[in-house]
Image (cartoon, rainbow, N blue to C red):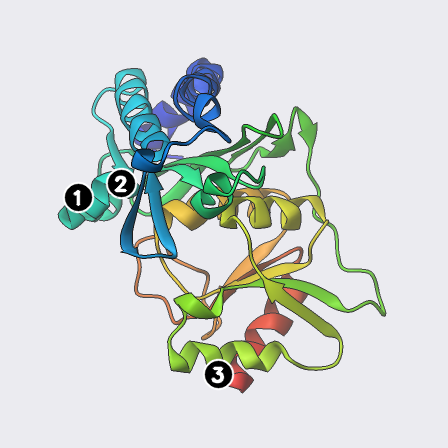
Amino acid sequence: MNEDMETIDEFLARHGADVEDAILKAAAAEILPRFRRLADHEVDQKSGPHDLVTDADRNAELFLTQALGDLLPGSVVVGEEAVHADPATYAAIRGDAPVWIVDPVDGTRQFVNGEDGFCTLVALARGGELLASWTYAPALDQLATAVRGRGAHLDGVRLLAGAPEAGQDLRVATSHPDYTTDEQKRALLGLRVPGVAPRPCGSAGLEYLAVARGASDAVAFSWEAAWDHAAGLLLVTEAGGAHLTRDGDPFRITGGNVLPFTAARDEATARRVAALLTDGA
């Protein structure tokens, strides 16, 4: 391990609890007070009616940008809402500085609808390598964490994804058709075979948590936005799972992936799903 990585490891040992505290405070201050209490003027559309943003998203991201930057001087924050305002900021994921990748409210549609299936996602990366992640579901009061090489935990209990039960259909959460190209739709059709039970996904972060817990077998997603995937990919990997793109390479948060890709409870399942996605294309 090089000196820079040792420095990050030392930071996580000293300040991991502070990161958790910042995430919980952001949710308590900016998200939960608006849950099931959103006024019409607090909800806007971005690219269309399926792409929503709320004051909770914006304000929680501002809170976390300040708090996380203060905790790790020299780091940068790449947040979903900041990138929407200035797409050039996304390039920091490929830079040399430690980068916080933040989705303040993953599952905004569910949040707007008053459903509890949303979460706050934070990941710490450097040079495209995931180092730590936090997945917090405020309405469920669940916090999942992962540190590279040190495992994944849910509310302090070690997560082990295990393997799918023999003879049972694979439970696979997939991208919603509204967010897929024609080629990606064809690839996802590869999952419509006996022995696989695909369904549309909810919050990406909570779908990854379901895989890490063994409550779902895999995801198959068709978009690259790092704030949706970074935290969950490390969570699944540290729980014993694996992720692969359609060409058989691991998913890269820096981009350039062959889509769709999968993350699964174990490597064998990841390879099975990736092969089906390739066959369907």
Q: CA distance from mark 3 to mark 2?
A: 30 Å
Given residues 202 and 40, the one toward you in this image is 40
Label 3, residues with CA under 10 Å away: few <14, some 14-19, many ≥20: some
Disc 1 designates what residue? 85
> What amino acid does circle 1 point to?
Ala
Whether residues under marks 2 and 1 lie with C-beta atoms below 8 angstroms apart, the answer is yes
SS for dot 2 = helix
Q: Which badge, 3 or 2, comes first in the chain's sequence?
A: 2
25 vs 262, left or right, is left
Disc 3 designates what residue? 186
SS for dot 3 = helix
Which residue is at a point 24% across and 28% down the rendered structure image? 75
Q: Which mark is residue 81?
A: 2
Residue 86: name its quadrant: top left
> What amino acid does circle 2 point to?
Glu
Given residues 59 and 252, the one toward you in this image is 59
Q: Can you say whether 51 is above or below 36 in the image?
A: below
- In the picture as drawn, the residue positioned furthest to the front comes out as 40
Label 2, residues with CA under 10 Å away: few <14, some 14-19, many ≥20: some
